[in-house]
Image (cartoon, grey):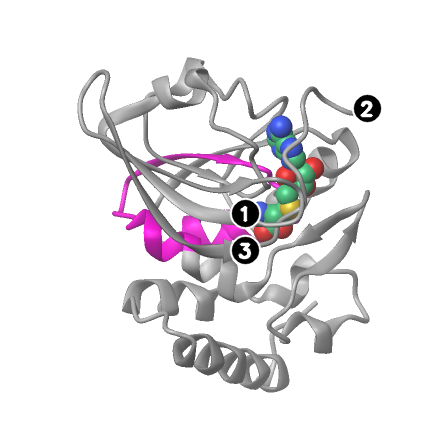
Amino acid sequence: MIDNYKTKGARRRLIEGIQRKGIDDERVIEALYKVPRHIFMESGFIEQAYVDQAFPIGAGQTISQPYTVAFQTQLLGINKGDKILEIGTGSGYQTAVLIELGAKVYTIERQYSLFLKTQSFFHKYGYKAHCFYGDGYIGKPTYGPYNKILITAAAPYISDELKQQLKIGGVLVAPIGDSYSQTMTSIIRISENEYKKEKFGEFVFVPMLKGVEK
Ligand code: SAH
């Protein structure tokens, strides 16, 4: 599917709306412009791709709301070359935004069908992400530690295993709470055993579930 003047125009309007909602990091805005969100959704949903809403992507999952993607990305403060662990690959939209910011992304998905689908999607469109099928509660210690960890599903808590995979000075961003509402939280690892937590308002994500699904 191509990115034409119509999709580019719709994306510009969407992003202007996101800026009005308070996203002001120029690098994040630029990355949002670079990623044609409609290719991450089934064809036929071009209009929905440029509305600031989450949308079903199959297997009971959703592509995150663009504002939420922008918000989490801004909180992470990505630098070029950062090594990032993402929990919840989903459609791959958030992954693509991180890649456009120059990050090296290691992304985990617990649903096998989605993992396969998004992995081949990345291949087709030339997004170089390291995709894993697994349980995000465990993380991916083999490739860690990471500069940043991003959770894109509602986490009831942050496992110690995950926190251990963060570099000192690194940041973990996650929506923490029950299945109805979560508080966007940033956790900075300030030393081997100390973490600093900050909260940034309420959001709603699909739940972070335990184990994997075939
Ligand atoms: N970042 C995605 C958002 C997808 S929704 C996007 O931009 O499209 C959240 C995703 O997290 C779902 O695909 C869900 O299957 C996945 N997920 C939930 N619990 C998980 C876990 N424990 N480990 C890995 N992925 C998980």
Answer yes or no: disc 1 within 8 Å of ligand 1. no
Q: Is residue 124 visible?
A: no
Q: Position of residue 122 (x, y in %)?
A: 60, 45
- Image: 1 above or below 94: below
Q: CA distance from mark 2 to mark 3?
A: 28 Å
Question: Which portion, as a residue range, is magenta?
Answer: 72-100
User: Callout 2, which amino acid?
Assistant: Lys
- Name the mark on residue 114: none
Q: Nearer the viewer, mark 2 or mark 3?
A: 3
Lower position in the chain sequence, tag 3 or tag 1: 1
Secondary structure under tag 1 reads strand
Q: Quadrant of residue 198?
A: top left
Q: Check if mark 3's residue and mark 1's residue have beta carbons within 8 Å.
A: yes
Q: Position of residue 51 (x, y in %)?
A: 64, 75
Q: Which residue is mark 1?
A: 182
Q: Nearer the viewer, residue 40 or 70?
A: 70
Lower position in the chain sequence, tag 2 or tag 1: 1
Q: Residue at x 69, y 34 (%)?
A: 115
Lower position in the chain sequence, tag 2 or tag 3: 3
Say which quadrant the N terminus sits in. Answer: bottom right
Q: Position of residue 38 (x, y in %)?
A: 66, 67
Q: How many marks?
A: 3
Q: Which residue is mark 2?
A: 214
Q: How many other residues sit within 10 Å of disc 3, few (<14), some (14-19) or many (≥20)?
A: some
Say which quadrant the C terminus sits in. Answer: top right
Give left or right: position of 166 versus 34.
left
Secondary structure under tag 2 reads loop
Quadrant of the image where one finds ligand 1: top right
User: Callout 3, which amino acid?
Assistant: Phe
Answer yes or no: disc 3 within 8 Å of ligand 1. no
Q: Which residue is mark 3?
A: 203
